[in-house]
Amino acid sequence: MIQITNQMESLLISQPFSQIPADALAILVFAEEAPPAELVSFSKWLDELRESGEFAGKPGELAVLHQSFGAWPAGIAARRVAVVGAGRRDAFDAAAVRKGVGSAVRTLKQKGVKTLAWWLAPADPAAFVEAAVEGAILGNYEPDVHKTSSKESKSLERFSLAVPSLAGETQAAFERGKILANAQNFTRDLVNEPANLMTPIILADRARAMAAEAGLECEVLDQDRMRQLGMGSLLGVAQGSAEPPALIVVRYRPASQPKSGDHLGLVGKGVTFDTGGVSIKPAEGMEKMKYDMAGGAAVLGAMRAIAQLKPSIPVTALVPAVENMVGARAQRPGDIVTSLSGKTVEVLNTDAEGRLILIDALTYAQRLGCTHLVDAATLTGAIVVALGHVNIGAFTNNEAMLARVLAAAKAEGEKTWPMPLDEDYKDLLKSAFADLANIGGRWGGAISAAWFLREFTGDTPWVHLDIAGTAWLDEAKPHLAKGPSGVCVRTFSNLAVNWPVQ
Ligand code: BES
Ligand code: ZN
Ligand code: ZN
């Protein structure tokens, strides 16, 4: 196994509340309700918490009682009991479980807890089991691989989820949660690497290693091969860097081909660093542009999960990987390149490079037989203006395809919002000298970027996800560390797994 940062052991157990041994045993308490029966012997403590206003069961609240406390009830094996606010029951769902467990993990690990057990109520559905283990694995992650001494961040060594019975459905949900969250942390590790340690070639090597381990096929097209094929748009971006580009292709094939002939293509922007090129970006904040390969990393993480979840349709991932640099060989504003599709593009701004590499990958995906396409890209600052850091922006040429992606995103709690892409915006990309310009003017920048991609999707149902605002957390959240979020890994995996088979 390729080691993922802070990987912990996660177990599904079935034991009575009182007998669970752990540094801390956590249990949800709902607002405006009597505490769960497991806590009867703690009722005095809970009454005091409520009266003092310290804990009323609201989301984000947490209180800890130690065994060393005088009135510790006899027969409770855990060393600490933590009550975690769940909010009102009618507003409680899988996303709340994921956040609640994640926040508790992040608080408790800082308090030195190494082994945490989590009590789930008997009536809780399988979706909560899945979300709970996801919350724990995601919450335990810290982007600290490059800190050599005095790590500020502590981590859990073991997370045990206690359920009333180890039914097959429960076990399957637990496994699914583990697979998805570990895949998401794999993606976060890739995104977290600085650009000197994550070049296009290194990204390709990591993809190869992941594929070999997961039992997937992997092929990497090098610069010569891309030149032979005619990927002039991708190569134009790559030419300014001393780091050679790579087009990473990873394939999953199901045991038997579905009759429908459906074949899902996942395409992810893999700009390992975006200086802007000759249309250079301001120095302030430029260091963040190491996350410009977050779409590519998400696609690779999804493939890692897909290899284990084994959906019934074939899935091919494509990651065009390049570094967008300034230099003597860099492309200039005004350069005209010929894309793999044959269409020519006038590069009016070298900082709009994501779309230039994606169009050659989208065309190539169709040549490889993909019948449905989804791409994820940190494509525009404009999507951050439009949707902030909360929602992914979704664009499509096919409403039915969009509905599938939105359903997958909703099921996984990855907020995604549909954006317009009507014909009226198309003219923004007119060029006087080539078939298309690579920018569309000041307004509606996320939409003109999406239209640019759409010009290369033909009739193939396609959804574009702009993740510029959601792939990186500028500040930690209660349930997630600062840094790469790994967004889209769960949505993509869910989309493949729940693909309707005919
Ligand atoms: N990688 C950036 C988009 C981006 C901006 C991602 C901020 C994350 C945070 C992309 O390559 C880019 O530079 N886009 C330009 C397009 C413009 C030149 C039309 C942008 O958004 O400013
Ligand atoms: Zn750019
Ligand atoms: Zn970029």
Image: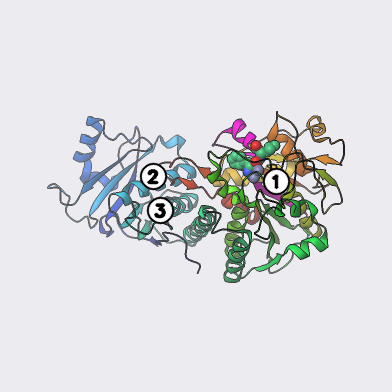
Residue 483 vs residue 258, the one in the foreground: 483
Residue 486's spot in the image, x, y percent? Answer: 54, 50
Task: Identify the residue at horizontal 68%, vertical 54% (top origin).
Answer: 266
Residue 335's spot in the image, x, y percent? Answer: 80, 45
State yes or no: residue 382 in magenta.
yes
**Which amino acid type corresponds to the residue marked 1 in the rendered image?**
Glu
1 and 3 marks in contact (CB < 8 Å): no
What number is the disc on residue 140?
A: 3
Q: Secondary structure at mark 2?
A: helix
Check mark 1 vs ligand 2: CB closer than 8 Å? yes or no.
yes
- Determine crowd level at label 1: few under 14, some 14-19, many 20+ residues with C-alpha closer than 10 A: many
Check mark 2 vs ligand 1: CB closer than 8 Å? yes or no.
no
- Say which residue label 1 marks: 353
**Left or right of 234 in this view: 326:** left
User: Residue 355 falls in which quadrant of the image?
Assistant: top right
Task: Identify the residue at horizontal 54%, vertical 36% (top origin).
Answer: 390
Colour setup of the view: rainbow
**Left or right of 49 in this view: 12:** right
What number is the disc on residue 103?
A: 2
**Marked residue nearer the N-terminal end (1 or 3):** 3
Q: CA distance from mark 2 to mark 1?
A: 37 Å
State yes or no: residue 1 in magenta.
no
Q: Secondary structure at mark 1?
A: loop
